[in-house]
Amino acid sequence: MSAPHELPHTGLLNPAALFGHHSTMMTKINIPTPLRQYAGKQPTVEVKAGTVAEALSGLVSKHPDLRRHLYTDDQKLRSFVNVYLNDEDVRYLQKEATAVKDGDTISIVPSIAGGR
Amino acid sequence: MLKIDKTDFDALRRHGEETYPHECCGVLLGQMDGEVRSVSSVVRCGNTRTDSPQNRYHIDPRELIRVQRQGRERGEDIVGFYHSHPDHPARWSTTDLAEAHWLGCSYVITSVEKGKAAMTNSFELAGSDEGDKKLVDEKIEVT
């Protein structure tokens, strides 16, 4: 019989049993050109997150200079900052509470508009 | 400064002629090197402002994500955007500035007069954040 921390019939260690179940995944966040200078000049940043909110929070924790470009003074996402989970605008999902799973990509896309 | 070859320059101007009397819009892909933005691809986009296309444009972020992904596969970054002003000068408007958020990128505007592309000007969105952003005239070097 396997010990509680071993995978059945193998004797191999089960990390989830040893360290507790992790519901957070590594999520890739695409950084738009104008914000890369505040993200260590990186085009993408990886964070551990279970939701879009956690991902963005992780991003600004790693790169605090991004905060003022993404959020208003009362910590709301700026209206021109579009956040996409893969190809879906999170406004039409569960907004920042939208869950992320392994392999998902979050894209930060400032809006492009204008006119004479 | 914006560097662009004649083929791409003519293409963005021609786009405005084709969509006249509506505004056209698109993305400039290439490389950033300090103050110089070099264009290697011009990508047409749809104008989602079908409610007022004669004086407004908006690019669907989903389209931009696709353009950006394709550009990244070729080693290209977004360096700017272009749009047209039908029967209106190639100068930025208060709406253009209010709706511009890609700091450090070029915003190219072509005036299209009676269906023919006239002047094309480029402006860098300068500044450090939304509070001090401004559109500054920049030279276009057509090669």
Image (spheres, coloured by chain):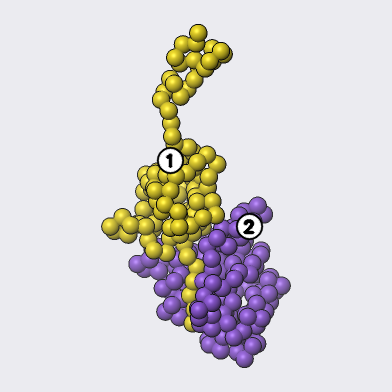
Chain colours: A yellow, B purple
SS assignment at label 2: helix
The residue that disc 2 covers is B71
Closer to us: B128 or B73: B73
Q: Which residue is mark 1?
A: A50
Image position, residue B133 (x, y; %): 40, 69
- Residue at 48 percent across and 75 percent down: it is A114
Label 1–label 2 contact, CB within 8 A: no
Mark sitting on residue B80:
none
> Local crowd at mark 1 within 10 Å, few (<14), some, or many (≥20)?
many
Q: Name the front one of labels 1 and 2.
A: 1
Residue type at numbered disc 1: Gly
The chain carrying label 1 is A
Residue A80 at x, y percent in the picture? 42, 64
Q: Chain of mark 2?
A: B
Q: Residues within 10 Å of mark 2 (few under 14, many from 20)?
A: some
User: In this view of the protein, which residue sits in the foreground, B47 or A72?
Assistant: B47
